Structures are given as C-alpha cells and as structure tokens.
C-alpha cells in the first residue's frame, strides 16, 4: 500500500504566489502521508503570458520552477510530478520558437528522472469566457509516450487534453504503466460533462489507477477551470475527490489488487485490434 495525492490549485499570474500556494499544498499532502504527489498543469505559470521568455528561463534544471520541484522533493523526501512547465526546445533537436509543455518526475533526492512533453495540444473552441484556445501558438507537440518505473509503481505520464485520446493510454498500459497521471487545467465548460467520465474510462479500460490533478478556479473571469481532482481505482471507483478551490485529495493504492484484477480480466491479452495510422 502506498499513498498518493493530487494537488488542486487556483494559480494566477504571479510565479511567486503560485509557488507559495504549491508549497503549502505539498506540505499538506505530506502531512496526509502521501509519497507520490501530482501537481496540476501550468502549476507555476498559469495566467502568465510571455511563454517564450518563461521557456528560456526554464531551459535547464536551474529554472525557478524546476528548482522549486527539486527543493520540495528533497525537503519532504517524496516523488513529485510537476504538472507542466514551459521549456525551450533547441532548434537542433527539431524545436522552433515555441516551448514544450514539459511534465517532470522528480525523485526524493531532487533529481529529474523523467520528462514527458505533452503530445496533444488544446486547439479547441469552447463555450466559455475565453471562447478559443490555441495551445499550438505557444507550444510544440511532443511525440514520445513515457512510462517511469518507481518504487511506488510504474507511472504513465499524460497531460490534460491527452485524456481524450485512449490510444495513448493503451500504449502506456501496454508498456507496463500501473498508475496513469493526468495533471490538467481542464476547462469548466468541458470538465463539467467530461472530466470524471474520462478519468474513470481510462482507469477501467486499462485496469490502472488514475490520478487527475486539475486547476480548480471555476469562476475565473478569463479562464475558468473545473477542478474535480480525483484518484480512481482500476475498477473505476472514485477513491477520493474534491470540487473546486485549492486543496489536496489523497488515497491509498494497492498494486496487488490491480494485479489480481488483471489476472481475472486480462483485457490487454484479449486485444484483437490495434490503432494503425494511415497516410492520405
């Protein structure tokens, strides 16, 4: 048994204020006995505008948000998953002037052991105060799914809009993932109808635990986010959740339970079709 936590935040346009809020909530999660903590998407920079400059400042481990993650993980001796941070991508590795939305996994020694770059970008029209979202204006698509082996289980890394693409989660599960992580800034307009539904679906179809750590400012005048952070077990049961505002949800996970379910219902072995990408 291990205890994991989803941290829900209401980040604004100030890096210092955002990190202060995150630090307080991390301490709260640790007090609850959590060993693996997941922060939401854009936890440090939600509401900040100059993504290109931020990304340059976060190019390496000396960046302020990346230093914060390392310090918190060391201080509390926990595994910490840092939502997303904009990170500049070098042109020689295929980058342009856009950032990568990078999700870092930091071990209890404060070392970055993995980084996932968000694959699916939110280029969508939504019926809310903002109306139109075009993440690809500021961010480039990632391309590589990431599974991280930790003492608490194998983590499959995803971010927010990825949640609508089940083939990614099937790929992660086939790669051994046992705990699927979904740091997010899911909008209120879509979250009310789809957030919990999709979290539970990804848990059930892959027989995985799912941790959804969302922004929770439902009445923000410019970009309302749904909240509803939750931890779901492999049978689709909501173990812990919350509505809006900042806070922590935590729950114990049992990988022996997960493995017994997979033995009884070996859906991964029963697959008859796989997604084949075709060209025009």
Image (cartoon, rainbow, N blue to C red):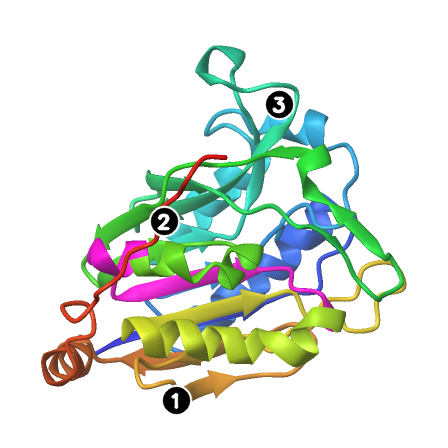
Q: Which residue is mark 3?
A: 56
Q: SS of the residue at dot 2?
A: helix
SS class of the residue under badge 1?
A: loop
> For the point 81% across and 59% down, which residue is it?
223
Question: Which residue is under mark 2?
Answer: 74
Question: How far apart, in angstroms, are the residues tagged by discs 1 and 3?
Answer: 41 Å
Q: Nearer the viewer, residue 13 or 194?
A: 194
Q: Earlier in the sequence, mark 1 or mark 3?
A: 3
Q: Is residue 264 left or right of residue 241?
A: left
Q: Is residue 166 left or right of residue 172?
A: right
Q: CA distance from mark 1 to mark 2?
A: 32 Å
Q: Earlier in the sequence, mark 1 or mark 2?
A: 2
Q: Where are the magenta residues, as a range?
A: 171-188
In contact (CB < 8 Å): disc 1 and disc 3? no
Front disc: 1 or 2 = 1
Taking the spot 32% from the left edge, 60% from the top edge, the residue there is: 170
Q: For the view shown, which residue lies furthest in the top direction?
A: 92
Few, some or many residues within 10 Å of mark 3 (<14, 14–19, 20+): some
* Helix, strand or loop status at disc 3: helix
Q: Nearer the viewer, residue 7 or 237?
A: 237
Q: Is residue 127 magenta?
A: no
Q: Which residue is mark 1?
A: 237
Which residue is rendered at x = 52% and y = 52% of the image?
83
**For residue 58, above or below residue 234:** above
Q: Is residue 113 left or right of residue 269?
A: right
Estimate how packed mark 2 is, as few (under 14), some (14 to 19) or many (20 or more) residues with alpha carbons within 10 Å: some
* Residue 254, position as x, y percentages in the image: 21, 80
How far apart marks 2 and 3 lie (CA) works out to 25 Å
Q: Is residue 57 above or below residue 114?
A: above
């Amino acid at each position: 048994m291990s205890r994991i936590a989803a941290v829900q935040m209401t980040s604004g346009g100030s890096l210092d204020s955002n990190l202060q809020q995150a630090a307080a909530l991390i301490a709260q999660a640790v007090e609850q006995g959590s060993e693996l903590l997941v922060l939401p998407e854009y936890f440090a920079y939600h509401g900040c505008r100059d993504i290109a400059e931020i990304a340059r400042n976060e190019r390496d481990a000396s960046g302020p948000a990346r230093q914060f993650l390392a310090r918190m993980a060391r201080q509390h001796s926990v595994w910490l998953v840092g939502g997303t941070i904009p990170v500049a991508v070098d042109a020689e590795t295929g980058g342009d002037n856009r950032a990568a939305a990078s999700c870092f996994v930091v071990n209890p020694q404060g070392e970055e052991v993995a980084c996932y770059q968000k694959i699916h970008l939110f280029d969508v029209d939504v019926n809310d105060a903002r109306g139109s979202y075009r993440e690809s204006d500021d961010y480039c698509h990632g391309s590589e799914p990431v599974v991280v082996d930790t003492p608490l289980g194998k983590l499959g890394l995803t971010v927010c809009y990825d949640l609508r693409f089940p083939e990614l989660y099937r790929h992660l599960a086939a790669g051994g993932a046992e705990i699927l992580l979904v740091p997010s800034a899911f909008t209120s307009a879509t979250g009310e109808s789809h957030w919990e539904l999709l979290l539970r679906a990804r848990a059930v179809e892959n027989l995985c635990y799912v941790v959804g750590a969302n922004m929770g400012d439902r009445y923000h005048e410019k970009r309302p986010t749904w909240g509803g952070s939750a931890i779901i077990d492999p049978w689709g049961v909501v173990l812990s959740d919350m509505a809006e505002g900042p806070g922590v949800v935590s729950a114990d996970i049992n990988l022996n339970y997960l493995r017994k379910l997979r033995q009884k219902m070996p859906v991964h072995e029963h697959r008859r079709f796989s997604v084949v990408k075709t060209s025009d």
